[in-house]
């Protein structure tokens, strides 16, 4: 039986055009957008970093974007105004001029005064440090109806956190160099060399946490010749650390009796426990610290989340240490600012491609559609809280970012 006999009227039905190709409704990508980016001078105490270095500014300007930088913004990282202006940036002489930009890119969260400069529908990209913010601070950002992206929440394609990763690498290595200073006579330490030389037992370094900070602290300590012990409750992290180092070192889960034995013989202890949410657990009690060697050094990298030593108290770059039970405590929250030029280059390497993508995609909203990793960093979208933890902590309504963006298509 032929198709015509099996399906009477098929020819006429086909002629009606039902099976002809139909128009498809596709989202039309907007053209490239020129961005107006403002970089204010950091006002947070001892924040020395800047989010873009001059070479990155030049790349963005050459791609058609406008950048305004407050005078002196790069001074603490040894970048002068003329270096930025030579690469095409405009130098502003008041913060108000900078905060006229559509995208505000800074390192530390805006101060209470800087919040007054922000206006509706701007995009703020900065560190958030939610554990250190009051509920009223987030509420003020909500009132401004901002888009806000937190450095520490941004992910890359491998679902790691590139800013945290980069700063952790810097902080891990720097923490050992800081410890070496405070073991020396120059800073009234024991007068010991961190590491080891022929005929003298090596320095004992204990590292709490087998994440990126712990790994890079271990690398630096091993490179100097120290004997390293790493504690973490994740066997996976401890195994990964040994594989990354390419050698076997002493590792252990955090068993109080074993940890105490290591602390008693330690010359340096680096606290690098990172809490996913909230406060870092205090895994070293005051009693444990009291049993450590006189003149030994504690570097509490976790202090920005409360610290993992019971004896820790926040210090700063001007007065970075205090002694308790004869143990030197270094508890500066912003260790990366100690090497601000290197840290600024690392930040710039992360944010330059992001800003270029925003321009290529046609704006911040279009870019967020395309980049899930940066979308993960959004905690405010047009004044709506899109981070569940922040919403619960500040007792504000939570809105799903994907649903908000889909509703506006």
Image (tube, rainbow, N blue to C red):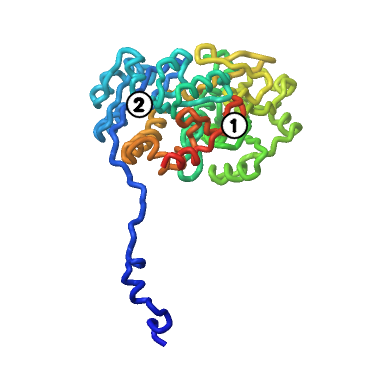
Indicate left or right for 101 with 139 as reference. left
Q: Give the quadrant of the N terminus.
A: bottom left
Which label belongs to residue 389? 1
Give above or below for 34 relative to 322.
below
Figure quadrant of residue 254: top right
- Residue under the image location 67 percent in, 38 percent down: 233
Q: Is residue 116 visible?
A: yes
Q: Secondary structure at mark 1?
A: helix
Query: Disc 2 to disc 1, how far (Cα)?
Result: 27 Å
Q: Residues within 10 Å of mark 2 (few under 14, many from 20)?
A: some
| Badge 2 vs badge 1, beta-carbon distance below 8 Å | no
Identify the image quadrant of residue 131: top right
Q: Is residue 148 left or right of residue 24?
A: right
Of helix, strand and loop, which one carries label 2? Answer: loop
Give the x, y percent position of residue 87: 25, 27
Residue 200 in view (yes/no):
no
Above or below: residue 165 compared with residue 333 = below
- The circle on residue 102 is 2
What's the residue at 57%, 30% (across, down)? 397
Q: Residue at x 53, y 44 (%)?
A: 244
């Amino acid at each position: 039986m032929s198709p015509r006999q099996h399906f009477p009227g098929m020819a006429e039905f086909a002629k009606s055009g039902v099976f002809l190709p139909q128009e498809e409704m596709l989202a039309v990508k907007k053209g490239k957008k020129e961005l107006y980016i403002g970089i204010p001078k950091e006002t947070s105490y001892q924040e020395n970093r800047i989010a873009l270095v001059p070479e990155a500014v030049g790349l963005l300007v050459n791609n058609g974007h406008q950048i305004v930088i407050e005078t002196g913004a790069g001074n603490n990282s040894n970048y002068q105004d003329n270096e930025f202006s030579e690469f095409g940036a405009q130098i502003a002489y008041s913060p108000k001029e900078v905060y006229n930009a559509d995208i505000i890119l800074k390192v530390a969260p805006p101060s209470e005064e800087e919040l007054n400069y922000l206006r509706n529908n701007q995009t703020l990209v900065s560190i958030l440090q939610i554990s250190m913010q009051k509920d009223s601070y987030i509420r003020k950002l909500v009132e401004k109806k901002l888009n806000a992206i937190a450095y520490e929440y941004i992910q890359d394609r491998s679902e790691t956190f590139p800013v945290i990763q980069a700063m952790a690498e810097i902080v891990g290595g720097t923490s050992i160099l800081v410890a070496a200073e405070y073991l020396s006579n120059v800073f009234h330490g024991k007068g010991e060399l961190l590491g080891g030389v022929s005929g003298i037992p090596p320095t004992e370094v204990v590292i709490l946490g087998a994440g990126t900070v712990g790994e890079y602290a271990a690398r630096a300590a091993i490179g100097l010749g120290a004997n390293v012990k790493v504690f973490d409750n994740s066997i996976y992290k401890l195994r990964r650390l040994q594989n990354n180092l390419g050698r076997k070192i002493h590792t252990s889960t955090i068993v109080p009796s074993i940890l105490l034995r290591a602390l008693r013989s330690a010359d340096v202890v680096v606290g690098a426990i990172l809490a996913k949410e909230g406060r870092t657990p205090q895994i070293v009690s005051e009693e444990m610290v009291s049993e450590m060697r006189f003149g030994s050094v504690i570097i509490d990298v976790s202090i920005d989340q409360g610290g993992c030593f019971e004896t820790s108290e926040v210090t700063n770059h001007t007065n970075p240490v205090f002694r308790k039970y004869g143990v030197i405590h270094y508890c500066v929250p912003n260790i990366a600012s100690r090497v601000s030029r290197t840290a600024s280059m690392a930040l710039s390497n992360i944010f330059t491609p992001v800003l270029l993508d925003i321009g290529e995609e046609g704006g911040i909203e279009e870019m967020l559609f395309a980049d899930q990793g940066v979308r993960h960093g959004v905690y405010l979208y047009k004044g709506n809280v899109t981070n569940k933890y922040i919403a619960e902590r500040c007792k504000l309504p939570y809105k799903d970012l994907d649903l908000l963006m889909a509703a506006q298509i």
